[in-house]
């Protein structure tokens, strides 16, 4: 193996709870009830696609014009970014800082494959942006997860083939995308089993990097 590809939300830091909080506030306002179980379906899904799923869940997919939908998505993002203001390096998930530093020392390149347009801001706040060699810009993608496009681009961005990379994901859609391009998939922090993952861990601290490189 020659490099690592990471999802952000739920792998590097637990921002999934903030996404949920911000979506729930908007859903309540629209009279749509969402819960944590429904939220699982939103993991890894882009901002506009998440909104569409919430509207469909409330049978309101045709109730709004495109402009109104864009305003809802912007409102959600404002609430979300507000919740991110207090992020610090202490919000890195267990083992992440150590893993990234070891990767740097061992010259194993690391890329971010996240649908989040807030990824650079979050990585700055967490103090780890310099430990990544590349961040895929989600604005350049034609398809979201579970399509493998983002993972293929991430491998390309660090100059390796998908099958030479290990991908980390907390969402089922992400694991599906990783496997669809022949990457090795490690499922992280999953409350529910991630089918298709080659391996599942609760934290990156459980992993031995030399064993991963030797895969
Ligand atoms: C990640 C998260 C999703 C989120 C998406 C877009 O994939 O798992 O919950 O909707 O990023 O994030 P953004 O910060 O651009 O709204
Ligand atoms: Mg995630």
Image (cartoon, grey):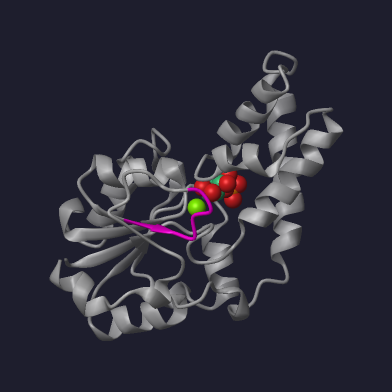
Residue 168 vertical placement versus 102 (above, below): above
Left of 48 or right of it: where is 161?
left
User: With respect to residue 52, does 24 lie above or below?
Assistant: below
Give the quarter of the figure containing the C terminus: bottom left
Q: Residue at left 24%, top 66%?
A: 3
Q: Quadrant of residue 130?
A: bottom left
Horizontal and vertical percent position of residue 91:
61, 74
* Residue drawn 55% across the image and 72% down it: 124
Using the rendered view, name the quadrant where residue 141 is placed: top left
> Residue 162 at what x, y percent from top left?
20, 52
Residue 213 x, y percent position in the rendering: 18, 72
Camera-side residue of 46 and 98: 98
Q: Quadrant of residue 31?
A: top right
Residue at the image position 67 percent from the left and 24 percent from the top: 57
The correct choice, above or below, for 24 with respect to 48 in the image is below
Q: Is residue 99 magenta?
A: no
Residue 191 lies in the magenta-colored region? yes
Q: Can residue 116 be spotted in the picture?
A: no
Residue at the bottom extreme of this rendering: 105
User: In the current view of this chain or complex, which residue is farthest to the left?
Assistant: 214
Instruction: Look at the image and tell me whether residue 73 can be seen.
Output: yes
x, y percent for residue 136: 39, 53
**104 and 36: which one is in front?**
36
Residue bounds of the magenta highlight: 186-192
Above-or-below relation of 189 to 93: above
Residue 111 relative to residue 54: left or right: left
Nearest the viewer among 55 and 111 is 55
């Amino acid at each position: 193996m020659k490099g690592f590809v990471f999802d952000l939300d739920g792998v590097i830091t637990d921002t999934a709870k903030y996404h949920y909080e911000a979506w729930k506030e908007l859903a309540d306002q629209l009279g749509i009830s969402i819960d944590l179980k429904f939220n699982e379906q939103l993991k890894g899904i882009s901002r506009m696609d998440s909104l569409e799923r919430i509207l469909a869940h409330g049978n309101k997919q045709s109730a709004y014009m495109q402009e109104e939908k864009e305003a809802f998505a912007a409102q959600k993002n404002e609430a979300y970014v507000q919740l991110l203001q207090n992020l610090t390096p202490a919000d890195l998930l267990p083992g992440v800082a150590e893993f990234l530093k070891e990767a740097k020392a061992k010259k194993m390149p690391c890329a971010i494959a996240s649908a989040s347009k807030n990824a650079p801001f979050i990585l700055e706040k967490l103090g780890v942006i310099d430990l990544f060699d590349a961040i895929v810009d989600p604005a350049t993608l034609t398809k979201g997860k579970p399509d493998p496009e983002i993972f293929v681009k991430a491998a390309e961005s660090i100059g390796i083939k998908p099958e030479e990379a290990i991908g980390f994901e907390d969402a089922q859609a992400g694991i599906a995308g990783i496997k669809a391009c022949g990457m090795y998939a490690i499922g992280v922090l999953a409350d529910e089993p991630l089918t298709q993952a080659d391996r599942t861990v609760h934290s990156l601290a459980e992993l031995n990097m030399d064993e991963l490189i030797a895969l």
